[in-house]
Image (cartoon, helix red, strand yellow):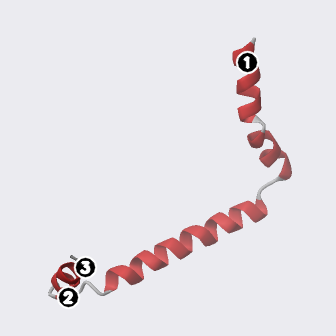
Amino acid sequence: MLKFVKHHMESITGIEIYPLISLVIFFVFFVILFYWVITAKKDYITKVSNIPLENQNDSLS
């Protein structure tokens, strides 16, 4: 099965750029995510991390 897919993909012209594009998108996404995590304010992180606990307390009342 894999040999069939690989042979079929080799017959498509210009397809070798797609793995590079997907790697760049993946890398850029995680660099931006890492930057956001490093620069996020501690108050915001605490507030967002307590949201599930607040919703649980509201449903029990």
Is mark 2 in CB contact (under 8 Å) with mark 3? no
**In whole angstroms, how far apart are the C-alphas of marks 1 and 3?**
52 Å
**In whole angstroms, how far apart are the C-alphas of marks 2 and 3?**
12 Å
**In whole angstroms, how far apart are the C-alphas of marks 2 and 1?**
57 Å
Q: Amino acid at mark 2?
A: Glu
Q: At which x and y percent is residue 7?
A: 18, 86
Quarter holding the N terminus?
bottom left
37 sits to left or right of 32 = right
Q: In the image, which disc is placed on residue 10?
A: 2
Q: Which comes sooner in the sequence, label 1 or label 3?
A: 3
What secondary structure is found at the residue carrying circle 2? helix
What secondary structure is found at the residue carrying circle 3? helix
Q: Which comes sooner in the sequence, label 2 or label 3?
A: 3
Mark nearer the viewer, 1 or 3:
3
What secondary structure is found at the residue carrying circle 1? helix
Q: At which x and y percent is residue 10?
A: 20, 88
Residue linked to disc 1 = 58
